[in-house]
Image: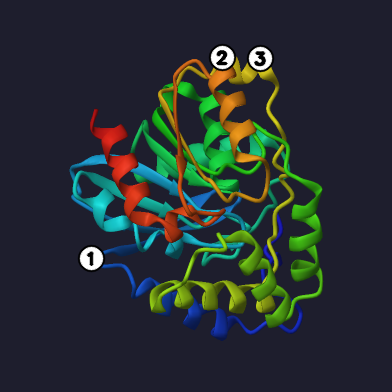
Amino acid sequence: MSKNLTIFRKKGNKQSFIEAYDETLKLWPVPYEELMIPTCFGDTHIVAAGPMDAEPLILLHGMTFSATMWYPNIESLCMKYRVFALDTIGDVGKGKVTKIMKTRQDTVDWLNDVLYGLKITSALFAGHSMGGWLSMNYAIFAPEKVRKLILFAPASGISKITPKFFLKVFPAILFPSESRIQKEIHWFVSPSFQPDEKAEKVFRQFTVSGTNCVPCQQVKPIVFPEQELQNLSTETLLLVGEDEVIYNPEKMLKKAERLLPNVTTKMIPKAGHGLTIEQYEKVNEAVMSFLLQ
């Protein structure tokens, strides 16, 4: 293990990153606590909320976002569940990386360590984009630990990501500037979306993170083999925005319905890749209906 790994760029400002993170976390409308759980890949930062004795729910954010992204969803989820919003180790969160995740098995080992540190044996899992992929992968490897699965526009996994994604995202990662990152955000969201002050704040955090940090992990989301998808019997809710840009949303949903044996799908109107923020009320309603059925 190396103790010299870091998410910060050579000229990155750690204090600016922390301040932007904490400012966004203030948007959470419920009491919360910040935890640090040791794993074989380093210390994982978690924002926890909800009744201590309630059923556990793990949230996994999209790549280059963080646990703060769940601010529009957390109040609804906390009514019934003890929610643990993870900062994916090696992504742009508050964790401390000591070993880089490189394989699918590495991500499973990491989540196993997180659950062990939280003293829970199984949980509900929900993930956005890369977090959706990580959740699916965990359900494939450790189905006994995933009670239900909620996927918000999962990155790959079911459908291949369009090459345009890499043309839009990688320049902002490799040559970060506020203007490039703003263009990336504009591409991701629906043309009809008008961000309010809260959304602007989380997008500001995304910009500050992008200019000061770069993910320190090497796991690339793949399309899972059809046999693995057909064997994924976990009860699953799959949500995607009608204005999704990382793949064709209709084709993705049709493929999921064909292959996943226990899936409920829903297209969210007037939403792009950031559906949990763009149309949070519709998303929250669909999620709670699924969880409580």
Mark 3, other Cα within 10 Å: few <14 / some 14–19 / many ≥20: few
Q: Marks 3 and 2, how far apart in space? A: 6 Å
Q: Which amino acid type is marked by label 3?
A: Gln
Mark 1, other Cα within 10 Å: few <14 / some 14–19 / many ≥20: few
**Residue 46: image location, x then y, percent:** 42, 57
Q: Marks 1 and 3, how far apart in space? A: 42 Å
For the residues carrying marks 1 and 3, which lies nearer the camera in this image? 3
Q: Is residue 17 above or below residue 223?
A: below
Q: Which amino acid type is marked by label 1?
A: Pro
The answer to whether residue 43 is left or right of residue 56 is right
- The quadrant where residue 73 appears: bottom left
- Name the residue carrying label 1: 31
- The quadrant where residue 123 appears: top left
For the residues carrying marks 1 and 2, which lies nearer the camera in this image? 2
- Name the residue carrying label 2: 231
**Residue 65: image location, x then y, percent:** 55, 62
Residue at 56% across / 31% down in the picture?
253
Q: Which amino acid type is marked by label 2?
A: Asn
Q: Marks 1 and 2, how far apart in space? A: 39 Å
Check whether the beta carbons of the residues at disc 3 and disc 2 lie within 8 A of each other.
Answer: yes
The answer to whether residue 94 is left or right of residue 219 is left
The kind of secondary structure element at disc 2 is loop
Check whether the beta carbons of the residues at disc 1 and disc 2 lie within 8 A of each other.
Answer: no
